[in-house]
Image: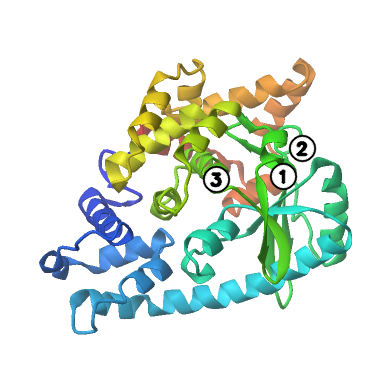
Amino acid sequence: MSRRLLHGAPIGIGAETRRFIVSIALQSPVEVNRWPLWTQAHTDLVRSQGLGPWMYAALRPFCESHPMGQVRLKLRPDYRSSSYASLLREKAGGEVLSAFSALGIVAVALKGCYLGQAVYRDAALRPMSDIDLLVHRDQFETARKALESIGYRVPQELLVRRDLNLEPSLAYFRSGTWPACLDLHMALWGMDYYRLSSSVVWDDVSEAAIYGEKVFFLSPELNFIHVAIHNLNHSGLLRDWLDLALLCRQPGFDWKRLVSLARSIGALRPLYWAFEELERSWGTPPPAEVREALREYVPHWLEDLVIRHPMRYIWRFGTRMALMDGWRSRLKYLRLASLPPVTYRHALTGSNGWLQYMTAKLGLFSHLWRTR
């Protein structure tokens, strides 16, 4: 958390916005007299955090004459554009799942696909940039060919020829009348440290349907673990923390099973830090027995370094290096990471120049130091 900023906004505005989101999400009484102070900066922050469509729906009880009713009117375009995007995604996703089904490929829909349907109950309320699908490792190449047969391509190898043993997913894009982005996964990993056992993952799915096609979802508890690791890995948006706050409040959420699953896949420490944030900022503490189990766990010395250290991305890079086979592979990766090809520099900065690339990297380290 920055000393001066919250998600790019002044701390006062960020904290006020989050408090209001928590009040609505948890159906707490909203301090009506306080919210005429809502400003355009608050609205801009909501939009930047991907919460415009959700807040538009959440503010439905406010009449148009109320200040928050006026905010709702401003957010109407966000909901409309998200609805249109979700329709396009439904068409694209349906084509993919239909192609997979024809080849007997079993797919699990992850993150936004699951959350939009099972938690928000309206895909338009939960914007997402791409579709995430998990397939069995032995069906991964078949799934790749299926995607390529309907026009999807890996845009470019940004850093090195992708080593799927280090990062078991590929980002696909399809241009044209119905552009679409899709991440194809063969395993669920995070921070190059937390590797969710495939046997546990595939034993914890249930059949569902999205985009008019058969698919599978992870259980709510395993989805919580996966999303929590993802948030900690990427310094999640307010929207991403709202995902978790709403997910664990779903009817039938099994807290004992959550702890059991996290223990079996070695992910208790991410849950500990996720609930630190949820309890402090989102009014969502875990039950006492869950809190006790998380506090009793003694983490490996590396866990807190890859989760929350100011230089956590360097620790994660080191973890990745440790996974490589031999020093020759490590030195090659280090060389390509420090002296990347022009395609990567251009994708990162929009320029082929080394100066812009180094400036971008220095900016990242500066951000990490400020948000320590």
Tell me, yes or no, whether the two marked residues, 2 and 1, touch with CB atoms within 8 Å. Answer: yes
**Image check: 11 left or right of 117?**
left
**What residue sits 40% from the left and 63% below the top?**
51
Look at the numbered disc 3 and give the secondary structure of its residue. Answer: helix
Per the image, the residue denoted by label 1 is 169
Residue 284 spot, x, y in % from top left: 33, 45
Foreground disc of the pair 2, 3:
2
Foreground of the two, 178 or 361: 178
**Above or below: residue 187 compared with residue 153:** above
**Image check: 78 left or right of 278?**
right
Is residue 47 visible to the viewer in this orientation of the structure? yes
Per the image, the residue denoted by label 3 is 356
**What residue sits 45% from the left and 51% below the top?**
247
**What residue sits 58% from the left and 72% below the top?**
86
Look at the numbered disc 1 and give the secondary structure of its residue. Answer: strand
Sequence order check: which comes first, mark 1 or mark 3?
1
Amino acid carrying mark 2 in the image: Leu
Amino acid carrying mark 3 in the image: Gln
Foreground of the two, 198 or 273: 198
